[in-house]
Amino acid sequence: MGDYRLAVEGTKPCGTKRRAYSYLRTRIIFLMSNDPEHKDILGNYIRIGDSAVVPDGRRNLRVGVVERVTPKMVAVKTVGSGISRRERLLYPGDILVVNDSKVTLYLLKHQAQ
């Protein structure tokens, strides 16, 4: 039996052609069904790349960018310096998506720090 390697990124080599196609079909179904749609506190959809305001855990608010969306939570990378510049996993109800020119200017100004 040959080692059937699929030319699709992210798949693993399987022993038989039948097992390889079965793995690929399962992977495609998983990726299609695992597309979460989250809404922020005001009901706006949260998308990757949106600018958002998030709590930092202390009583302050931070501005950040949505990096990734998981089935249950949203990862937001905050801007700033030091420990404040990190990726935080937050529930969608804790996020406020703001798409404004002043927020974009703030992100561009503080992204280089």
Image (cartoon, rainbow, N blue to C red):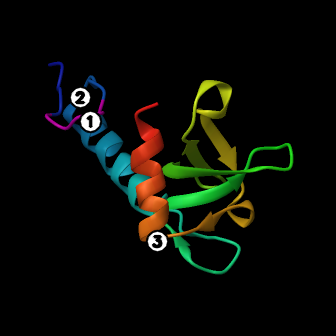
Q: Which residues are magenta?
A: 7-11
Asked if the stretch drawn in magenta spans residue 9, the answer is yes
Indicate which disc, 2 or 3, sits on the residue closer to the N terminus.
2
Residue placed furthest toward the right: 59
Could you tell me residue 30's position as x and y percent?
44, 53
Please, what secondary structure does the residue beneath circle 1 have? helix
Tag 1 near tag 3, CB within 8 Å: no
Q: Viewer-proximal residue, 52 or 14?
A: 52
Q: Which residue is mark 2?
A: 16
The vertical placement of 72 against 79, above or below, is: below
Q: CA separation, marks 1 and 2?
A: 6 Å
Residue placed at 30% from the left, 33% from the top? 10
Please, what secondary structure does the residue beneath circle 3 have? loop
Tag 1 near tag 2, CB within 8 Å: yes
Could you tell me residue 73's position as x and y percent?
65, 53
Q: Which residue is mark 1?
A: 20
The amino acid sitting under disc 2 is Thr
Q: Which residue is mark 3?
A: 100
Q: Quadrant of residue 7?
A: top left
The vertical placement of 73 against 12, above or below, is: below
In the displayed structure, does residue 76 sit left or right of residue 7? Answer: right
Instruction: Check disc 2: other Cα within 10 Å, few if <14, some if 14-19, many if 20+.
Output: some
Q: Nearer the viewer, mark 1 or mark 2?
A: 1
Please, what secondary structure does the residue beneath circle 2 have? loop
Instruction: Check disc 3: other Cα within 10 Å, few if <14, some if 14-19, many if 20+.
Output: few
Q: Nearer the viewer, mark 1 or mark 3?
A: 3
Could you tell me residue 92's position as x and y percent?
68, 62
Tag 2 near tag 3, CB within 8 Å: no
Residue placed at 18% from the left, 19% from the top? 3
In the displayed structure, does residue 38 sit left or right of residue 54? Answer: left
